[in-house]
């Protein structure tokens, strides 16, 4: 496939590299020039403007993978819609609110184009391990991008089409809400180990043992173990934890459907409280985990 990746940040750069290495023709575009230069050095084509990006497709149907923060998707989308020809396919691979995705897909359809949503999980390890992808939108358009999804996916069954527009982002939102709850449980448990009756416990050792086919063996526990091994007291980590919207949207949706989500609510509240100074060992570990899987700032700024 020929595919443009717009937004070469922590996620987009990995996506561009994996597509390129699988033999796809990648047009690398970004707001600032530095990441484009880096992708060019790896053998991809670079496009420094949106106009250049569109022109690079020639007579081919443009396929654009957008990988930017959710709060800039609307402005970016409008700018692309003004330039792309009809029949173009836009994939929003970021963590967007599924309700906005549904509205956006109508706007995109009115412009004669198609929007797919592809919630993408795997964090900064996706390049190495492959990504897990949750796709929504027109099924026929989805079928056309399966070669790209094959290139990006972790081995065996790591992507699926879930339904009409927004379904992919809805599944990804739910995934992230679950992630908040699991992370909070781990953080609270390690805090209990540290500050409970056996104060000198080796937390990383507990994490290591738990990684050997215990019931809570998991990637998040593995990352907790690693963080505690490298920095047992989590020194230098403030414990302020950002939230990026998905749990908030999930809680709003659960409320709309009268569904209880007390543990996800609690994990969300802990993050908000951390931002007004309620920090402790558990919130430090949350920040450390986010840094390890997503490259997020350790000071909780994003
Ligand atoms: N990090 C993760 O673990 C992870 C995992 C799954 C999904 N996601 C989602 O993937 C998306 C991208 O995340 P990321 O971690 O890759 O973010 P990131 O590292 O902060 O990169 C953001 C990218 O968006 C561009 N950008 C920012 N503001 C822009 C604007 N106003 N106009 C145009 N471009 C703009 C940046 O360009 P510049 O280089 O010019 O700043 C950069 O290429 C988000 O929706 C995020 O929630 C992230």
Image: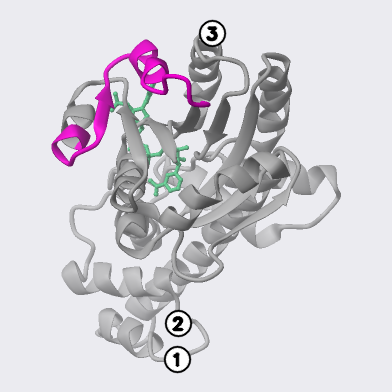
* Vertical relation: 121 (above or below) 277: below
Q: Is residue 301 visible?
A: no
Residues under labels 2 and 1: Cα distance? 6 Å
Disc 3 on helix, strand or loop?
loop
* Vertical relation: 246 (above or below) 55: below
* Vertical relation: 80 (above or below) 34: above
Front: mark 1 or 3:
3
Q: Are marks 2 and 1 in contact (CB under 8 Å)?
A: yes
Q: Is mark 1 within 8 Å of ligand 1?
A: no
Give the number of callouts: 3
* Vertical relation: 73 (above or below) 183: above
Query: How crowded is the residue under tag 2: few (<14 C-alpha within 10 Å), some, or many (20+)?
Result: some
Q: Which mark is residue 285?
A: none
Q: Residue at x 55, y 29 (%)?
A: 90
Q: Provide the residue designation for mark 1.
A: 213
Q: Provide the residue designation for mark 3.
A: 82
Q: Provide the residue designation for mark 2.
A: 217
Q: Quadrant of the N terminus?
A: top left
Which of the pair 88/174 is nearer the observer? 88
Q: Is mark 3 within 8 Å of ligand 1?
A: no
Magenta-tinted stretch = 39-61
User: Given the current orientation, which residue lies at the most extreme front position?
Assistant: 59
Question: Would residue 67 be found to the left or right of residue 74 on screen?
Answer: left
Would residue 51 be counted in the magenta stretch?
yes
Q: Return the x and y of residue 196 as percentages of the image width and height.
A: 39, 80
Q: Return the x and y of residue 30 as percentages of the image width and height.
A: 31, 25
Disc 2 on helix, strand or loop?
loop
């Amino acid at each position: 496939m020929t595919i443009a990746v717009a937004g070469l940040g922590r996620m987009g750069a990995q996506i561009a590299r994996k597509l390129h290495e699988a033999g796809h023709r990648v047009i690398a575009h970004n707001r600032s020039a530095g990441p484009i230069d880096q992708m060019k050095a790896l053998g991809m084509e670079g496009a420094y403007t949106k106009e250049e990006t569109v022109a690079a497709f020639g007579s081919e149907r443009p396929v654009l993978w957008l990988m930017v923060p959710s709060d800039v998707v609307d402005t970016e989308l409008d700018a692309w819609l003004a330039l792309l020809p009809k029949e173009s396919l836009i994939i929003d691979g970021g963590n967007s609110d599924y309700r906005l995705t549904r509205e956006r897909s109508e706007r995109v359809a009115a412009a004669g184009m198609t929007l797919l949503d592809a919630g993408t999980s795997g964090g900064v390890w996706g390049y190495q391990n492959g990504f897990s992808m949750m796709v929504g939108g027109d099924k026929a358009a989805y079928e056309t991008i399966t070669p790209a999804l094959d290139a990006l996916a972790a081995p065996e069954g790591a992507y699926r089409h879930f339904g009409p527009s927004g379904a992919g982002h809805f599944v990804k939102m739910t995934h992230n809400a679950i992630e908040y709850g699991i992370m909070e449980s781990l953080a609270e448990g390690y805090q209990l180990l540290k500050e409970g009756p056996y104060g000198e416990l080796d937390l990383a050792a507990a994490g290591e043992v738990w990684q050997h086919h215990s019931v809570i063996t998991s990637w998040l526990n593995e990352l907790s173990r690693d963080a505690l091994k490298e920095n047992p007291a989590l020194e230098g980590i403030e414990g302020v934890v950002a939230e990026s919207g998905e749990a908030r949207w999930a809680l709003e949706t659960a409320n709309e459907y009268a569904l209880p989500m007390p543990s996800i609510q609690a994990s969300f509240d802990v993050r908000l409280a951390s931002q007004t100074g309620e920090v402790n060992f558990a919130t430090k570990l949350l920040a450390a985990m986010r840094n390890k899987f997503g490259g997020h700032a350790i000071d909780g700024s994003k």
